[in-house]
Amino acid sequence: MGLNVELKKLEELELETQRLAAQLQSSKANNGSADQTDDDLLKLQVENTKLKHRLAILRQSIAEESKAGGSIEVQENSSITEHLHFVFAQAIALAFPEYKDTPVSIAPVNSASAKFGDYQCNNAMKLAKQLKEKGINKSPGDIATEIQRNCPVSPLIEKLEVAGAGFVNVFLSKNYASQALSGLLRNGVKPPPVPKRRVLIDFSSPNIAKQMHVGHLRSTIIGESICRLLEFLQHDVVRINHLGDWGTQFGMLIAHLEDRFPNFLNESPPIGDLQVFYKESKKRFDEDEEFKKRAYSRVVSLQSGEPNSIKAWQLICDVSRKEFQTIYNRLDVSIQERGESFYQSRMLSVVEFLRKKNLLEPDEGREIMWPDESKTGIPLTIVKSDGGFTYDTSDMAAIRHRLEEEKCSWIIYVVDAGQSTHFNTIFKAAERCGILDRAVHRVDHVQFGVVLGEDGKKFKTRSGDTVKLSDLLDEGMKRSLNQLESRGRNDVLTPQELKDAQEAVAYSCIKYADLCHNRISDYIFSFDKMLEDRGNTAVYLLYTYTRICSIARNSGEDFSDLAKVLEGVNIDLSHEKEWKLAKTLLKMHDILIKCSNELFLHFLCEFCYEVCTVFTEFYDSCYCIEKNKAGEIIAVNRSRILLCEATAAVLRQSFFILGLKPVAKI
Ligand SMILES: NC(=[NH2+])NCCC[C@H](N)C(=O)O
């Protein structure tokens, strides 16, 4: 095992040990101190100390190896930026030992300024300032030179140059790039190595009996892509639909069901439109005192598990569930249902837990909890004055379950930006009571803006109603067919091919339009815009992809077994455009890591767009297949066709993460 690989593994282990120790500690706090737990904790601590020791030795030996003019290996599928971090961290540690923990700063160089290399380390300027504060005068240029001199030799680097105000410019090695692309073609696109976590993603999460609206659509699309991204990076992903299936509205729904379909226990009620049903029951609830009373009593019986109320509740949930599932099937989303009702018993115990810790205080008949001791911010309502629980209570029970029982070390909530105060409060409160430990757990509220209509106002139908998602998807299908027909594709494609293309375009467009913007800003929903075949749209990407795939097919040679083709061909990157394309493709791992660190998918969308435009530049100036005047193939440049295939592979993997479905013909 290479030193770097071992180092990464050890770092992962250390994280895991810390997480286990925290878990033991918290279960000890909850259960009183059991001897067994004490023993386990002790063992873990010893283990952790050993690990730390081993880590220190390793770091030292890596540093020494490079001091002796040593070299450094590149981990397979490693992100270039990460590798360069490693290289420069060592160089800085050797050149300026007292700054060995300085965060390394590496930036890609804009491809327009290729003479400055491909990546840049710009630590020297900051170091010059820090040294000056200590009374040492050294120019950034001199510092950069010292850093450069101490860099270990890496197969990834062709040369290093100091330039400008103290930058160290990195020129990537063509040889390395060519080998990395061969590996990619041979083994498929593989994920960059990252420390693995068990991560729970709470997304989609609509409410029973209510309309699933465009906000839920955003959560569904973004959430699904985050799951795919993290699964690709080999994390252990738990996909959770936190359905709103337990609110007080169920009282009135149950009471209304009892009246409308008295035989519901024996025969499933034909509730066609749950929204109408909901409106009817709400009207009665507001107008009829008697009904209101019964509705309240049904909430109590439901939450205490009375069988008839449970049965009625299940029937209602089933109606919604079926509707949601059709949307998930259409969008190719998979998710496990674990609604608020799942936490009923855990809400009881989390209340007990908080009460024992003296964290609940009375407030006009309610019981509230402040997120921090200073009592600033907004308190959570943990118990209502009628003894019932709230959205806050279920989220406290959920976060506890996810960290302690589900043993996740990372939770991601994909919910609209309107709920950011709620989540901030939940996170702080969870920290305050010892459920959440930020040293070992990561929690993110992946928030997103609202969907606007083309008029810039909230997205609504012409009549001012909220848009039904199934109608929206139907409209997308219609528009996509129109677009294909206007290009005459219905004359070229078979009916099945046309249908596949229609679906691919419709759903890919809707997803991509959502993902390609910074999610935090509001976004304007426009079918016209998303169906454009130019610019950063799904249609452009899908067309380009299909075109790339057709190149090998039309070459008259067999490219089905890439490993075999590679035996006789070296990927040649001597043409400027070949080299540019290769470097673009090799950025994929950097991008995936950036997306998963920051949980923004538009970086990946921009990457796909860049790959397509750089590919087009390449294809415009580099012949892959040469034909004579008669249209006969006279030469096939296999190396270039392999580059096309590598481009297709990179796009295919990125499309999969973004939920875009490529088709063979379009
Ligand atoms: N754990 C959570 N609170 N998840 C999000 C739930 C979203 C909620 N059902 C809504 O529609 O607004």
Image (tube, helix red, strand yellow):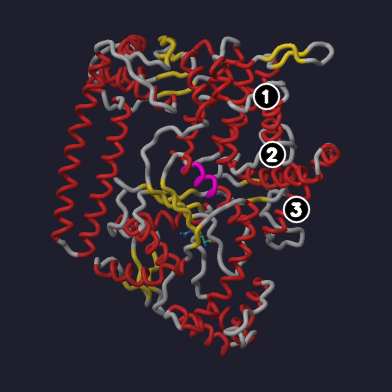
Which residue is identified by label 1? Answer: 552
Question: Within 8 Å: ligand 1 and the Cβ of disc 1?
Answer: no
Give the number of the mark in front: 3 or 1: 1
Check if residue 293 falls in the magenta segment.
no
Image quarter of the N terminus: top left
> How far across and how far down the image is residue 134, in percent?
23, 19
Badge 1 density bin: few <14, some 14–19, many ≥20, Cα 10 Å: many
Does residue 50 sit above or below 547 in this rendering?
below
Question: Within 8 Å: ligand 1 and the Cβ of disc 3?
Answer: no
Badge 2 density bin: few <14, some 14–19, many ≥20, Cα 10 Å: some
Badge 3 density bin: few <14, some 14–19, many ≥20, Cα 10 Å: some
Q: Earlier in the sequence, mark 1 or mark 2?
A: 1
Q: Nearer the viewer, residue 487 or 531?
A: 487
Give the distance between the C-alpha atoms of the residues marked 3 and 2, in whole angstroms.
21 Å
Name the residue rendered at 48%, 65% in the picture. 339
Residue type at mark 2?
Val
Check if residue 226 falls in the magenta segment.
yes
Q: Nearer the viewer, residue 271 or 457?
A: 271
Name the residue rendered at 50%, 75% in the picture. 248
Question: Within 8 Å: ligand 1 and the Cβ of disc 2?
Answer: no
> How far across and how far down the image is residue 80, in percent?
44, 24
Disc 3 vs disc 2: Cβ atoms closer than 8 Å? no
Tag shown at residue 502: none
Give the distance between the C-alpha atoms of the residues marked 3 and 1, in whole angstroms.
36 Å
Give the distance between the C-alpha atoms of the residues marked 1 and 2, in whole angstroms.
16 Å
Residue type at mark 3?
Glu
Which residue is identified by label 2? Answer: 663
Give the number of the mark in front: 1 or 2: 1
Q: Earlier in the sequence, mark 3 or mark 1?
A: 3
Q: Earlier in the sequence, mark 3 or mark 2?
A: 3
Which residue is identified by label 3? Answer: 475
Q: Which residues are magenta?
A: 223-230
